[in-house]
């Protein structure tokens, strides 16, 4: 969060404190940068259909015969349907706290009358809700990229040294982007490779600016021609990778920018977006937008946060309160054949 904290005066932490200082959560860069399309209201399963039309060009004849409409070995006269799915999985956001913990910081939270009948002050609700949303978005920002259903053991992904694991901790409820891509390029079943397979341009670790530049060139050369002019075509990488590349460009004899400036977030005219959730040694190139043409979709079972959040006293004989959100979520790529990836993460 980036809210401004204001103090009326210094030296007293009680009634003059207008707001609470909270540790900055990283938020959700994938949302903020407009890289994902969100489909809400999915209770069970949502199909992402794609269609490819085979060869329809033929020699001109006065009267076409039924044989001219026959299916050929290369997909002539045939619609090829493929389906990928969003199947949101359940998880929960939950927090218990005692409003009396705030008495020494806010005058309005100090005891006034019978505490048994005292309700949770709206200001306190707003502050706790903001903090809760920040932490939820921090989790989602990471999980979009590095989660794996069933956890790290089920993912079976080899992680580069000192890099973000896939499916670790609570990132176990659904498959994220990295897991989806690695499954797609190593699978043989029709459902996983529906829509083609991702283009893997390299698997080396990106430990220098020169290596990153070479990876970007390799990715660009392998980019499918039909998507090169799409306005949403974007390179996504983590901040460490961008910093190495930025330093490399600045150190060149023919400088792109001065040391005090950051180089343009561009390669071959396409945006480069560093985000916190993307893991190390990984660059992804694809058409990523908030619209239905995006190659990255998220399915959720809620319309907005305010409709699924429950705030109440823990029980009738307790002064504790709780916040609870029950959520369902899944992530999937729509057309894998139009995604180019360089990653040192591997799956046998």
Image (spheres, helix red, strand yellow):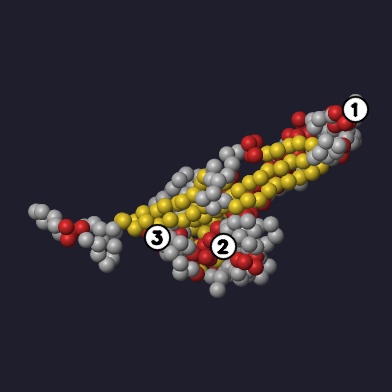
Q: Secondary structure at mark 1?
A: loop
Specify which label sits upstream in the sequence, 1 or 3. Answer: 1
Contact (Cβ within 8 Å) of mark 1 with mark 3: no
- Residue 110 lies, with reference to residue 267, above or below; the image says above
Residue 151 screen position, x and y as percent: 65, 63
Residues under labels 1 and 2: Cα distance?
54 Å
**Residue visible at 43% across and 64% down in the picture:** 190
**Residue visible at 73% across and 37% down in the picture:** 311
Residue 344 screen position, x and y as percent: 57, 69
In which quarter of the view is residue 162 placed? bottom right
- Residue 160 lies, with reference to residue 286, above or below; the image says below
Q: Secondary structure at mark 3?
A: loop
Residue 288 in view of the camera: no
Q: Is residue 3 left or right of residue 252?
A: right
Q: Nearer the viewer, mark 2 or mark 3?
A: 2
Contact (Cβ within 8 Å) of mark 2 with mark 3: no
Residue 100 in view of the camera: yes
**Residue visible at 76% across and 30% down in the picture:** 122
Specify which label sits upstream in the sequence, 2 or 3. Answer: 2
**According to the image, label 2 marks what residue?**
179
Q: For the C terminus, which image quadrant? A: bottom right
Residues under labels 2 and 3: Cα distance?
22 Å
Residue 318 screen position, x and y as percent: 85, 38
Dot 1: within a 10 Å radius of its alpha carbon, few (fewer than 14), some, or many (20 or more) residues? few
Q: For the N terminus, which image quadrant? A: top right
- Residue 104 lies, with reference to residue 257, above or below; the image says above
Residue 224's tag is 3
**Residue visible at 63% across and 62% down in the picture:** 150
**According to the image, label 1 marks what residue?**
114
């Amino acid at each position: 969060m980036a809210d401004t904290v204001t103090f009326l005066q210094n030296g007293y932490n009680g009634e003059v404190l207008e707001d609470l200082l909270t540790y900055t959560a990283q938020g959700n860069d994938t949302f903020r940068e407009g890289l994902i399309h969100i489909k809400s209201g999915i209770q069970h399963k949502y199909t992402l259909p794609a269609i490819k039309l085979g060869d329809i060009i033929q020699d001109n004849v006065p009267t076409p015969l039924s044989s001219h409409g026959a299916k050929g070995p290369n997909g002539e006269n045939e619609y090829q349907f493929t389906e990928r799915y969003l199947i949101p999985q359940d998880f929960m956001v939950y927090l218990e706290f005692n409003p009396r913990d705030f008495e020494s910081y806010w005058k309005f939270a100090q005891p006034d009358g019978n505490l048994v009948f005292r309700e949770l002050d709206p200001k306190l609700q707003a502050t706790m809700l903001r903090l809760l949303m920040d932490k939820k978005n921090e989790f989602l920002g990471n999980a979009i990229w590095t989660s794996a259903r069933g956890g790290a053991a089920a993912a079976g992904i080899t992680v580069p040294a000192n890099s973000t694991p896939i499916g670790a901790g609570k990132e176990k409820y659904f498959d994220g982007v990295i897991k989806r891509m690695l499954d797609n390029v190593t699978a043989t079943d029709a459902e996983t490779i529906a829509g083609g397979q991702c283009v893997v341009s390299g698997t080396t670790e990106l430990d220098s600016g020169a290596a990153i530049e070479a990876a970007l060139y390799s990715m660009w050369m392998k980019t499918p021609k039909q998507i090169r002019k799409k306005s949403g075509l974007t390179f996504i990488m983590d901040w460490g990778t961008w910093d190495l590349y930025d330093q490399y460009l600045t150190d060149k004899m023919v400088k792109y920018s001065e040391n005090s400036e950051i180089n343009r977030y561009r390669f071959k005219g396409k945006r480069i977006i560093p985000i916190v959730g993307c893991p190390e040694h990984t660059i992804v190139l694809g058409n990523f937008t908030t619209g239905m043409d995006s190659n990255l979709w998220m399915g959720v079972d809620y319309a907005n946060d305010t409709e699924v959040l429950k705030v109440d006293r823990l029980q009738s004989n307790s002064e504790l309160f709780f916040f609870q959100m029950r959520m369902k979520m899944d992530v999937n790529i729509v057309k894998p054949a139009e995604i180019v990836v360089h990653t040192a993460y591997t799956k046998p």
